[in-house]
Structures are given as structure tokens and as C-alpha cells.
Image: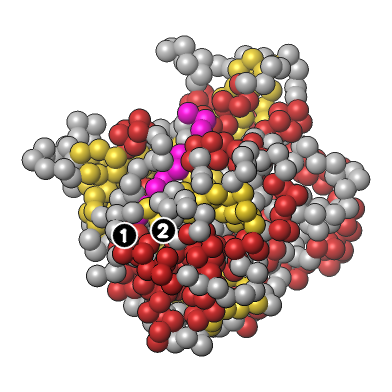
Amino acid sequence: MINNVLEYLEEACQKYPAKTAFIEPGKSYTYEQAVEIAKTIGSNIAQKKVYGKPIAVIADRDLISLMGFFGIVYAGNFYVPIDKALPLERKNTILRVMDPALVLYQEKDAKSMEGMDLQERHCTMESLYHGQVSIDEEALAKVREQHLSTMPLYIMFTSGSTGVPKGVVVSHGSVVDLVEQFAVTFAFKEDEIFANQAPFDFDVSVKDIYSTIKNKATMCIIPKSMFIMPKKLLSYLDENKATTIIWAASAMSVVATFKGLDKVKPESLRNIMFSGEVLPMKVLHYWQKNLPDANYVNLYGPTEITCNCTYYKVDRPFGMEEVLPIGKAFPNTQILLLNEEGKEVAEGETGEICVRGCSLALGYYNNDEATKKAFCQNPLHNSYIDRIYRTGDMGYYNERHELVFAARKDHQIKHMGHRIELAEIEIPVNALDFIDKCCCVYDEQAEKIVLFYEAAKECNVEIIEKLQVKLPKYMCPNRMIHMEKIPMNSHEKMDRVKLKKMLSEVYHES
Amino acid sequence: MEELMKILKELRPEVDFENEDKLIDNGILDSFDLVALVGEINDTFDVEVEFEDMEPENFNSAKAMYAMIQRLEDEV
């Protein structure tokens, strides 16, 4: 049994040392090189005597960040990717929550580290590996002996409704479970070339990274700039002979919006998988029309159950008005649909999607309260410890017994592939001294976060400028509406329903 | 141009679209901005911004975008 993800890397290295494991534009590593570099980084971290503690990586989607992750695991630590593009305050909030033993960054990013709450615990990637292999096999072996599959592998941060992001702690065992099920369910082969789109601080990328090493395959990193100006994107996929893409639905939409496949069709693509939010039907149709022979798979699941818990292989044509199901649970995973009383709903009825199985995360880092709320005892019995994760998503089974996502229970939204608690936007806006009151709603149709606010005068620019230093860009409102008075409902709460209704009227005016 | 400015201001009220000429090169606009922007341009000006038009030089400034839109309008 695999109890450490590094065994995948080492097995691949043993069988195909000279095979290309990871590619970024202009640079690639073979399996042998990857193991050597990761072991060198791991040996150098091991010297710092911080065993078992979290280590932050100011990450970019590049090979060196990836080697940093593996190196951290070799040292017996777990990694926390922090996107280097996040605003400073956000980075510091994450550092405060996790209190890492080390913060790794690349020399070229030294400038962006200014103002970060580092407290002497930072070190550059270059100081851990500067082109020279130097491995302390003995130290690494000692680490491995102590390893348990229940130990954390990484922490990924996700939006929290109290205004502070939550760090989801995921174990080696859960990731092993994930990639084993993926490999069987989708029949991945050794010649697979995974074209990575998702940022490394986003758990969609976990599927690329660990499916690659599990299947002794190759991962090819697509630079972010190609999604901004996608002219080169499709030819890059084609040149690299990408076979599998596991992308955020929003990235699929980028290609469809710009009609990228009209000009270049990467015929090597055989698995096209997407998650993060509901894929618009016209986007699916566009891809299917251009690449009719590929397998299309809708994946569903929150970070807390390790990437995905259900999948739906698109096996029939869908009309524009139809909804793509999220399908059925992966093997070794169970879905329960529970009602308010914690009982299973009847067939066809809507209930909260709850997940059971060893894919469940270890909870939220240093946040017992939030952990207890979301990860709880299976309410169907109390005979032994049996954790379930309450997703907060509502779902039902259609007449074909396929699971369908219906709605959210709370004020969490999905926007541009990201999970966002609307309260996390409202809290910093309310904290501004020129704001009296505010309320965020999501306009699903226009895919916009709309902020209604009460203030002495209109101050859209001031709000957005203040927010940008606190929140990631995808959390900043796309539309701001100044109001004399925000409507209240009968419970003296801000009336979100009325505000949403007003939205369509506002659109009408403009 | 006025219509375009209105779209841009709505999209990113804090950006100085009058003067900024490295919107793409400096990473001011990201892929989501561009998806939204191209959708708005297509609808408002009744043009079709195509894959071939997705180059930094067409989007680095409001002026460049407007020039592209005019070119596309002429093609229709």
C-alpha cells in the first residue's frame, strides 16, 4: 500500500528515469532530475529541524515551486502554496492562521516579499537548491520511517464566512485515494500528458500533479499568459500533444468565448474534464463540436473532500436548457443526501450533499470550531466514529439516478471557479469608515458580484481601491451600487431577495 | 469611444483607462476581465472579436481596443 505520495515519484523514476516528468515553456525535468532536486531541497530543509510543521511556498505555476512541494514532503513537512499574486494583507492573514516554520520564495520575487510577516523564517528556493545535487539519504530515510498516511500533505486556503480564510488540511492517504480512483475510473495511461491550467494554490492542480506521478506520465504547465491572450494556448496544447486537461470550467469558457478551437484543434486531447462551477451548455457544445471524439467529464467536489467526490461522464446530448448532472460518487466514496433533521431524503427530493469516505480532509488548520461544524458524525448512527463532511451544497437525484447540483444552503457562491463567502467581501467593506452598511449578492446570469452599499456619497473607486489590497482580485465586486437605503426584510435583515430582484431592473435602466 | 470607456469603467472602476497603455503587458487585465470585456464589446458594438484578435497590442490601451473595434466594424 502506498502511504506516501513520494512513492509514486520514486516508482516512476525507477522505471523511467529519463522520461520527461514536468514541462514548463523552455524547461523540463526528467523523473530522475525531479527526484534529485526534490531530495536536495528536502535534505536542506531537514537540516533546519522543523520536522512535521507546515511550510509556506510563495508559489507560481512553475517547476521550481513544484520541486519545492516535493522537497518539503521529503523533509517530513507539509506545504502551503500561497499564490504570489495575492495581495499582501491576504498573504499575511494566511501566514497568521498557519504560523509556518518556513516561508520559501524565489529570489526573483524578493521584492514582493516586502511587508510580509516573515519573522526570520524565510528562505529562498535558491538557497535550498542551486543547481548542485547534494542529498542526505540517511536523514531522508529517517523521515520516511516515521511517516503515516494520515499525516498532512498540504493545506489549501479557501474563503471563510467569518472574514478569515480557512486552511483545509489534506493527508497523503486522501490524495492517494483520489489518484487511484481517478486512474481506474478514467483509465489513465503512462503516455498521458496532463496540461495544467489551475494555479498551485487551488486544489484542481492536485489532480494534475499527483495523477502525473501516479501514472508515470508527464505534466505540462500552461503559462498563465496564454489564458489572458489565448492565441497561443491551443497550439501549445497541440505542440505538447496534451492528452488530458483537468481545468476549471471558467478556463473552458475562455477557449469557447474566443473560439479558439476554430483555428487549432489539439486532436491529441482525449480526456476533457472540468469542475469548479456549472459549465455553460454552449461552452460544452462548442468543445464537443470541435473535438467530438474526446471524453467529457463533469467533476464535482469541494477542497474538503480532496478535489472531487462525484463525476459524470457526458454520455448523451444535452439541450441548452438542460443541466449537466454531477453524476455519481467515485469508488470508495459515498454521498448522503440529508434533510434538516439529519435523515436521508426520499428519492427525487433535494437534500444537503454530505460526503463519506477516506477522501475527507483532516479539518481546518487551527480552527476547531469551523472543523466541528462541517466535519461531523454521520447522523444516521452513533455506534462508532464515522465522519461525514457537510458540503452546504444542495442536490437531488434525477430520474436516471444521476446526482444533480441544485443550489447553495448559505451565502457561498462560485465565481470564476473560486468559492467565495459573500460575508468575506462584506466584512472589509463594512470596516471602511465612509460606508454605513453593505450587502453583496451574486448575479448568476451576468456572473457578477454585486455590492450594494449605503454611504454619504457614491464611492466606487475608493471601495475597490481599499478592497484590492485585502482580497484576491476574483473576490472584488464587479458592480457597485450606491443606495440611500438598503431594503430590509421583516426580520430587520438586509433583504437579499429584494436586492436580487432590483438587479434586473438596474440592468434594464443601463 | 464613450461607449467603450463606459464598459471599461464598469469593469474596473479603479483603472485609469484614459492613460494606461500597458493593460496586458503589466497584467492589469486578467483572463476573466478579458472574457467579460470581449463579451461586452461583441454585444455593444455588434462585432465579433475573434481568436486572431486576441493579441496584447489590441488590448493594451483603450485606444488600441477602440481601433480594433473600428476595424472590425468596417469588416462587417
Query: In this orientation, which residue lies closer to the viewer: A96 or B35?
Result: A96
In the rendered structure, the answer to whether residue A454 lies left or right of residue B28 reads: left
Mark seen at residue A431: none
Percent position of residue A11, x then y: 37, 79
Residue A193, percent across and down? 50, 78
Q: Is residue A169 magenta?
A: yes
A195 magenta-colored: no
* In the rendered image, the vertical position of residue A469 relative to residue A13, given as above or below: above
**Which is more N-terminal, label 2 or label 1?**
2
Left or right of A116? Residue B18 is right
Q: Residue at x 64, y 74 (%)?
A: A131
> Pointer 2: what residue?
A76
Could you say whether the residue bearing mark 2 is in a helix, strand or loop?
loop
Say which residue appears at 61% left-offset and 21% top-offset. Answer: A430
Q: Quadrant of residue A64?
A: bottom right
Count of labels shown? 2
Which element is circle 1 on?
loop
What chain letter is assigned to the residue under label 1?
A
Residue for badge 1: A146
Q: Report the front residue among A406 and B28.
A: B28
Look at 65% across and 63% down and name the residue there: A126
- What residue type is disc 1 on? Gln
Q: Main secondary structure of the magenta part?
A: strand
Nearest the camera: B59 or A88?
A88
Q: Quadrant of the C terminus of chain B?
A: bottom right
Q: Are marks 1 and 2 in contact (CB under 8 Å)?
A: yes
Q: In this rendering, does residue A507 appear at all?
A: no
Q: Which residues are magenta?
A: A162-171
